[in-house]
Each structure stands twice: as structure tokens, then as C-alpha cells.
Image: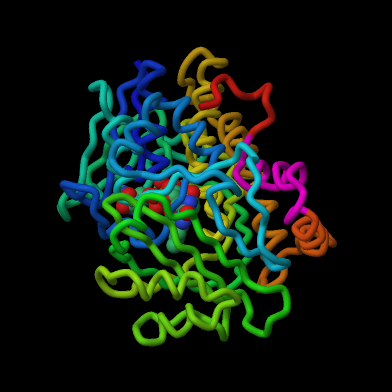
Amino acid sequence: MTTAIVLGGGFAGVLAAAVLARHGGDVLVAEGDRYPSGPLPRRGLPQARHSHVLVTGGARALEDLLPGTLEALYARGAHRRGLTGDALILSAEGWFGRHDTGAYLVSCTRALLDQVVRHRALAGGRVTVWQDARVLALTGDAARVTGVTISRAGGPPETVEADLVVDATGRRSKAPRWLAGLGVPEVAETVVSSGLAYATRLYRAPEGLAAGLPAIMIHPGAADGRPGQGATLFPVEDDRWVVTLTGTRGGEPPAREPGFTAFARRLRSPVVAVLMAAATPLGRVRPYRDTANRRRFFERTPLPEGFLAIGDAVVAVNPVYSHGMSIAALGALRLDRELTRHGGVKPSRTPELQAAVAEVADPSWRMAIGQDSRYAVRDDAPPAGTAAARSLLSRATLTSPELATRLFHAQTLIAPAPERERTP
Ligand SMILES: Cc1cc2nc3c(=O)[nH]c(=O)nc-3n(C[C@H](O)[C@H](O)[C@H](O)COP(=O)(O)OP(=O)(O)OC[C@H]3O[C@@H](n4cnc5c(N)ncnc54)[C@H](O)[C@@H]3O)c2cc1C
């Protein structure tokens, strides 16, 4: 029997664990953090305090992996907002018309999303979770990974053997360093940073305005002298709104009041500031700066058998594009299909699996670095003309339902029809 250990029990980790368990293995998830008892933020997931929406492609993948999850989320207060019919979107070129494009996003707190997904992914009894279990290193050699060393509850390192080790430790993954410790050549990495900073605050919605509010997105202007400044306001569960303000270097949103509100008032549209003024703040403003696009090219490395990386550990895009969780869900779905094709988990096939996972993330990566080329401090060049082409397309899509459909299908990672089995 194959045994697998998944490093990190975040969004990608629990989905990978569910997939591996379905293919007949015993699965252990080693999570360095402790899960909260309810839908609350936790230390190991600092980004969970910020807006998290699940775009259509990811929502569909999640539903394929764990049927009934979207209904479970809606039952707990998550909102579905059609793009652009249930949204107010001010692009660099103007307001989008309200079109029925078939694309949508699911909005709730990241804490609720994680709790619901984790509960469903780990149901079934084949997955064991160790919390407070920090992974320290990989064991084996450059040809074969045989397990990991882990410190449980701060105790001395212990070795856990496994046929398959899946790194899902997220954006700050140390897997390249761990692999180097086994003698594996360096994993190539590309970082493209727009320098975007986030500041987020939760609000209690005023009575009567909670459930029906559209999703609101104010994009940065093309040349308004306030580089990269924008805002989103999304309705979330329990009659709350989450407001995120964004800005690039020199135009970052303040991490406290009164600057936070003043920043919202100065944006290209005051709509978010007007709604904030009518709502009740809940908790303080939370800043976040680690937003660079980061890709680790594991698939170009001669990887040892028995090792695989997924989720943000492979491709972490600028969060402003709302793709990260969808990349994780689409990657887990692809893993599921590859394992079906291979007849189960075969550690010798992990390099192929790694290539498949990277392929799924590629469209998001290209879109993100193309867009960020406007502000980027980077160590490679995006395709020539990408930003200009995007701007032209964006202007035309404001009024054209056909173009809006194309754009929002691309932006929400809706796969071409033949690749889909179900389309909730
Ligand atoms: C500010 C912000 C906003 C975002 N907004 C969106 C959005 O709107 N939509 C969207 O789709 N995506 C969004 N994202 C991206 C999303 O958060 C990530 O893509 C997603 O969390 C990736 O899942 P993951 O499981 O790969 O990593 P994570 O969710 O980060 O999970 C990694 C897990 O590994 C654990 N871990 C780390 N190191 C160790 C170790 N050594 N040993 C054991 N466990 C370890 C951590 O505790 C954590 O549980 C946003 C990101 C940020 C930063």
C-alpha cells in the first residue's frame, strides 16, 4: 500500500490529501499550525484576514473534487456574485456594463472557506492530521525521497517514512532548500513583484444592505498619478463586508485610521468610502505586503522520485488577481485525473505529475506577470506588448457582452468545455 505525507494542511494540502486518499493510499497531513475551533484566522495563514474570493474555474474544480461544497458554503452565508451582472467594476478605462457572462465569484471569509473545505476533504477516515507538526527537512537522496523529519509540538525531530511526499507549505515553501540538502540541483525561481501592498478591514453592514450588495472592484487608473491604487468591497457571511485597499510603492494604503478611510475617499470612485461610512468597523486595519508573483520551476529540476509540490509552493500569483486557491483546486483536480490515468499513486511517476501541476498553473502565471509588467521590479521579461493589448481589450469589453464574456472567462479560469465534466 502507498503511504503519502502532505506537508502543510492549508487549502492545497487538504485537497491533495483528499485526492490521494481516494486513490487508495494512507495519507498523513503534517500541519505546523493548530486549526481554530471555528471559522477564525490562524497564525499559519496570515493572508486569511484579507479578501479571498473563489473564481469560477476554482469553484467548479472544488465542486468536482468535493461535490456539495459550494452549497455548504452558501448555507453558511457565502455569496455568489455574477460577473458582471452582480458587480460594480471600475476598470482603468471606465465602468463595466452589467453583462451575464456566466463567470462568477464566491465570496466569504477565507476562514470559513478553509473550515468548510477542510471538513469535507478530511472526511472519510483515510487521512490522519497531525497539527502543531512542523516539517524540518526531507529524507532520502537525490534519486528518491523517503520521508521527512518533523518536530511535533516543539519536540525533537522525528523521521516519518512515506512513499510519496507532497509539499503544500505555501508561498514561503522551503522545499527547494530541503531538496538541496539531498543533493538535488537548485530549483529555478522567478519573482515578479509589482510592489503591491494590501490593507484590509472588516465591517458590519448596515441593516438592509448586507445580502444584496454587489461585489465592488475599483481598479487602478492607467495614468492617474496614484500608482496601482484600488479597492474591493465584498459581502461575506454574517452580514459583514470585507474592504481591501491596495497601492504600489509610494502609494501604499495606510495600515491605520484615519488614513485608511481617507485613502478610500481619494480613489477614482468614492463608492467604497461611502459604504464604509455607513458601516461599522470590526477590528483593526490589517496590512499585508508579501504579494510578489513567485514561481518555482520544480518541473524543470531533475526531481527525486516520490516528491511533488502543489499550490502556492509552485506558483503564487499576486493576490489581487484572486487566482491562488483556484490554482490549488485545479492542480488537485489534475492530480486526481493523472492518478486515475496512472492507475494510482506510483512514486516513480512524480516528475510527470509535477509537470501536469505546473501546466495547470501556467495561464494564471502568464496573466499575472503580463499585467504586473506595468509596475514590476522583476528578473525576467513578460511577453512584449501584453499590457498594451490588455488595456485595449479592457476598453472594448466595457460595453461588449461577447468581449466581456471572453475576458471574464479568462480572468476566472473557466476551462474550455471539453475539459469539463460538470459545470455547476
Ligand atoms: C493577501 C492575500 C489575498 C489573497 N486573496 C486571494 C483571493 O481572493 N482568491 C484566491 O484564490 N487566492 C487568494 N490568495 C492566495 C491564497 O491565499 C493562496 O493561493 C492559497 O492559500 C494557497 O494555498 P496553499 O495551501 O498552497 O498555501 P497556504 O494556504 O498558505 O497553506 C500552507 C500551509 O502550510 C503550513 N506550513 C507552512 N510551513 C510549514 C512547515 N514547515 N511544516 C508544516 N506546515 C507548514 C501553514 O501553516 C499552512 O497551513 C490571496 C493571498 C494573499 C497573500
Nearest the viewer among 358 and 365 is 365
Q: Check the image and tell me how it is coloured.
A: rainbow
43 is higher (above) or lower (below) than 417 = below
Question: In screen coordinates, is 112 left or right of 102?
Answer: left
Query: Does the magenta portion include 412?
Result: yes
Nearest the viewer among 290 and 162 is 290
Query: Residue visible at 61% across and 74% down?
Result: 228
Percent x, y of residue 133:
23, 47
- Position of the N terminus, as image quadrant, is top left
Q: How many marks?
A: 0
Nearest the viewer among 86 and 92 is 86
Q: Is residue 170 visible?
A: no
Q: Is residue 218 visible?
A: yes
> Seen from this angle, which residue lies furthest top?
343
Query: Does the magenta portion include 312?
Result: no
Kindly indicate the quadrant of the structure image that contains residue 387.
bottom right
Magenta residue span: 397-414
Question: In screen coordinates, is 144 left or right of 223?
Answer: left
